Image (spheres, grey):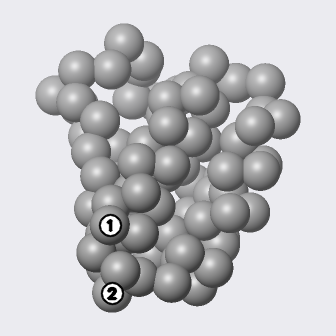
Amino acid sequence: MQSKASAMFSRIAPRKARMIINFVRGKNAAEAIQILQFTPKAAAPVVKKLIESAVANAQAKGADVDRLFISKATVDKA
């Protein structure tokens, strides 16, 4: 099952956000949240909140939260 979340109009440079997204892409969702909690980068809280939102969306659809991972993550300039 796929879940989607988007963060629009965030006050963070796309270059900084891409660096964090590349760091967590392909990881388990819980592991990614744990990593982002201790990452001292400006975009880490924004990406962490986005992943938590995607997990909540999947949980509302009835997905198994323990099996979620980040399959696709992109950062585009708005």
Image quadrant in which the C terminus is located: top left
Residue 1 is situated, as x and y percent measured from the top left of the image, at 33, 87
Q: Pointer 1 and pointer 2: residues touching (CB < 8 Å)?
A: no
Amino acid under disc 2: Met
**Residue 58, image quadrant:** bottom left
The residue positioned 50% from the left and 37% from the top of the image is 49
Amino acid under disc 1: Ala
Q: Which residue occupies the extreme top position in the image? A: 11
Q: Is residue 62 above or below residue 34?
A: below
Q: Is residue 24 above or below residue 48?
A: below
Element under disc 1 = helix
Which of the two residues, 43 or 52, is positioned nearer the viewer here? 52
Dot label at residue 15 = none
Tag 1: Cα neighbours inside 10 Å, few (<14), some, or many (≥20)?
Answer: few
Q: Is residue 10 above or below residue 31?
A: above
The residue positioned 50% from the left and 69% from the top of the image is 70
| Left or right: where 47 falls relative to 59 | right
Per the image, the residue denoted by label 2 is: 1
Residue 34 is situated, as x and y percent measured from the top left of the image, at 77, 50
